[in-house]
Amino acid sequence: MEQQVLELVKQLGHTALDEDVLELLCQCACQRLDRLLADGVSPADCGQAYPMAAAFLVLDWARQAAGGGDIVSLTAGDLSVRRDSAAGDGLHRQALELMAPYLREEGFVFRGVRG
């Protein structure tokens, strides 16, 4: 599965990171998703959502490692550049949305109140 994720990463984004680092990030992304899977769900059960979500995580991490973030402000006098550090959250969020049907519930669940 990690090799499939690596191929997707190469197809989706141009990253300046070394291929060995990308392979490690792919392993970590797969491990991250594996920990979030609901009981009894395997990566194979997720179809193409799993490798795509893992690739999104790798691209997000690679972007963060490269100091990525969308430039939200640029000043010419006394040069100043400000990046939006939350910009990378989009890929992470998309990864989790792709995998939502296969992940265990971790959010708030209202079970009832005794009256």
Image: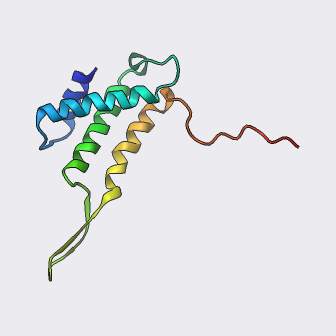
- Relative to 43, is 2 on the left or the right? left
Number of dots carrying numbers: 0
x and y percent of residue 99 in the render? 44, 31
Image coordinates of residue 76 in percent, x first then y, are 14, 79
Considering the image in quadrants, where does the N terminus appear?
top left
Give the quadrant of residue 5: top left
Residue 105: image location, x then y, percent: 56, 33
Q: Residue at x 22, y 31 (%)?
A: 24
How is the structure coloured here?
Answer: rainbow
- In this image, 73 relative to 100: left or right? left
103, above or below 47, in the image: below
Image quarter for residue 87?
bottom left
Location of residue 6 in the rendering, given as x and y in whole percent from the top left corner = 21, 28
Q: Is residue 46 above or below residue 64?
A: above
Residue lying at the far right in this picture: please name it.
115
The reply, left or right, for residue 88 in relation to residue 105 is: left
| Picture residue at 35% right of the left edge, 24% below the top | 48
The residue under the point 27% across, 37% down is 58
Q: Which residue appears at 22% of the width and 44% of the height? A: 62
The residue sitting at the bottom extreme is: 77
